[in-house]
Amino acid sequence: MRNFAYLLLTLLPLSAMAQSENLMYSEGKIYVVIAVIAIIFLGLAGYLYRMDRKVTALENEK
């Protein structure tokens, strides 16, 4: 009985997470999350590209 209680307590957060994922899919909010992650990724990629070009220009200057 004690092991069952531990199993139940460990599985409760997983079921809550699965419900929140279904909620995000059903309301279309998952696309907002994906869009925000994509914007952040593109911003970081652009920043790294600019920094690489600046460092390359400084290296060629010497």
Image (spheres, rainbow, N blue to C red):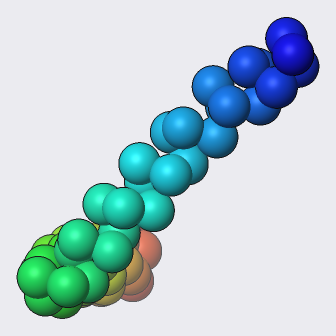
The residue nearer to you, when weighing 36 against 43, is 36
Residue at 20 percent across and 85 percent down: it is 26
Residue at 63 percent across and 25 percent down: it is 9
Count of numbered tags = 0
| Left or right for 6, reference 49 | right
The residue nearer to you, when weighing 32 against 1, is 1
Which of the 4 quarters of the picture holds residue 22? bottom left
Q: Position of residue 10 (x, y in %)?
A: 67, 31
Image position of 11 with respect to 7: above or below: below
Q: Position of residue 58 (x, y in %)?
A: 31, 72
Residue at 50 percent across and 52 percent down: it is 15
Image position of 8 with respect to 27: above or below: above
Residue at 41 percent across and 74 percent down: it is 59
- Observer able to see residue 17: yes
The residue nearer to you, when weighing 30 against 11, is 11
The furthest residue to the front: 1
Which of the 4 quarters of the picture holds residue 2? top right
Name the quadrant of the C terminus.
bottom left
Name the quadrant of the N terminus.
top right
| Left or right for 4, reference 51 | right
Which of the 4 quarters of the picture holds residue 7? top right
Q: Position of residue 46 (x, y in %)?
A: 22, 84
